[in-house]
Image (spheres, helix red, strand yellow):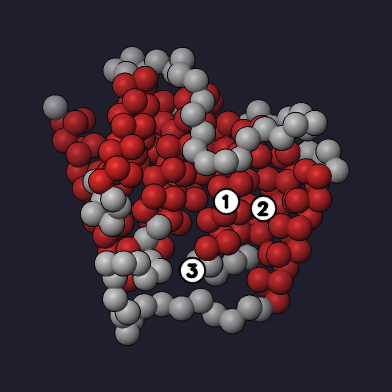
Amino acid sequence: MMESGRRGAARRNVLAAVLLGAAVCAPLGADQSPRADQPTCPEPSARTAAAAELADLADLEIRTGGSWSRAAWLLVHSASMLPRCDAGRFTALRTAARYYHFAGDDERASAVSFEAGEHGVWTGHVGDAADAFIDAATFALEAGDLDRARTAADHALALGESPHLGAPQRLAIRGRAESLLESIGPGGDSGVPLAISGPVRRTAGFHPR
């Protein structure tokens, strides 16, 4: 009962962070109006140019049959050089997580995907954040890290309650998160197949390194 209460409180905290982030940082949608205090990204700088160069190197690494792990490392460092408000930071982290997975390093894949989810929460990109947390939970299951898997799935479940999503998207996110939590189970059964979100898949002709 106490554990359930802590998890419920954690979900409420995540949802509160999402509501705050979405209100302040998200791009304007049909139900949003401009805010005077909406943060803006700084102008491109030498750091953003260097981040783009690292991302290009990561792309070259994959296109030439190089190392998934090195490509992931390059993208993580690219993300670290971008301002927090830059959407490219989320994309770089999300892709890096999948590259680590392709390399067979699901522990790092989960950690980086979790970071991408946190970034999505901060910027108010609720659906993207939920997808990243679901990936983080899935990678953690593969790595046998049941605590991280449960935490990431709980975060995704909380995001599935956000009013900033349409009803079908909320239902889909909650369904996937609940399925993961059921797969973890009280004993932490990790025998669940991967169900990675989004279009990135193992590329034909390349093999994990």
Q: Who's the residue at 61% across and 59% down the image?
A: 79
Q: Residues within 10 Å of mark 2 (few under 14, many from 20)?
A: many
Q: Residues within 10 Å of mark 3 (few under 14, many from 20)?
A: some
Residue 36 as seen in the image, left or right of residue 204:
left
Q: Who's the residue at 49% across and 29% down the image?
A: 195
**Where does label 3 land, which residue?**
85
Q: Position of residue 204 (x, y in %)?
A: 75, 31
Q: Secondary structure at mark 1?
A: helix
Q: How many marks?
A: 3
Q: Position of residue 158 (x, y in %)?
A: 27, 44
Quarter of the image with the C terminus in it: top right
Q: Residues within 10 Å of mark 1 (few under 14, many from 20)?
A: many
Q: Is residue 68 shown to the viewer in this render?
A: yes
Q: Who's the residue at 51% across and 76% down the image?
A: 41
Counting residues from the N terminus, which is met first, the one under dot 3 or under dot 1? 3
Q: Position of residue 201 (x, y in %)?
A: 63, 35
In the displayed image of the protein, which residue is found farthest to the bottom? 36
Counting residues from the N terminus, which is met first, the one under dot 3 or under dot 2? 2
Residue 70 as seen in the image, left or right of residue 195:
right
Mark 1 and 2 residues: CB-CB less than 8 Å, in contact? yes
Quarter of the image with the N terminus in it: top left
Q: Position of residue 43 (x, y in %)?
A: 59, 81
Q: Secondary structure at mark 3?
A: loop
**Where does label 2 land, which residue?**
75
Q: Is residue 25 shown to the viewer in this render?
A: no
| Three-letter code for the amino acid on which mark 2 is drawn | Leu
CA–CA distance in space, label 3 to label 2: 17 Å
**Where does label 1 land, which residue?**
93
Q: Is residue 27 above or below residue 115?
A: below
